Amino acid sequence: MDTWIFLAALFFLTMGIFLTWATISKRRTEQRLNDPNAPKSSLAKDGPGPNPVTAPRRGEPQPR
């Protein structure tokens, strides 16, 4: 009986921590999306693009 109480408590604690983390992450993401001064992603159409220093060049072998 003690094992089941421990496992249930561990389950609910884990779920509580996960839901708290997800809520905080969602709130931070929404704040960043609403911030006009946040830098654009390099993957966005109007973003700065890939860094030319670290971008792969044509003809060079890709690391595996």
Image (cartoon, grey):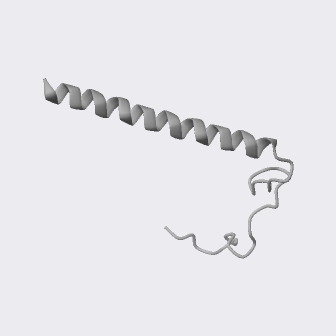
The residue at 74%/64% (across/down) is 50
Q: Position of residue 21 (x, y in %)?
A: 52, 40
Q: Is residue 23 left or right of residue 57?
A: left
Question: What number of labels is visible?
Answer: 0
In the image, residue 26 above or below residue 36: above
Decide which of 49, 11 is in the foreground and name it.
Answer: 11
Q: Which quadrant of the rendered structure holds the N terminus?
A: top left
Q: Position of residue 53 (x, y in %)?
A: 72, 76
The residue at 81%/41% (across/down) is 34
Q: Position of residue 39 (x, y in %)?
A: 80, 56
Q: In the figure, residue 6 lies in which quadrant?
A: top left
Q: Among all residues in the image, which is located at the extreme left? A: 1
The residue at 74%/53% (across/down) is 43
Decide which of 60, 2 is in the foreground and name it.
Answer: 2
Q: In the figure, residue 9 lies in which quadrant?
A: top left
Decide which of 56, 20 is in the foreground and name it.
Answer: 20
The residue at 59%/40% (across/down) is 24
Q: In the figure, residue 7 lies in which quadrant?
A: top left
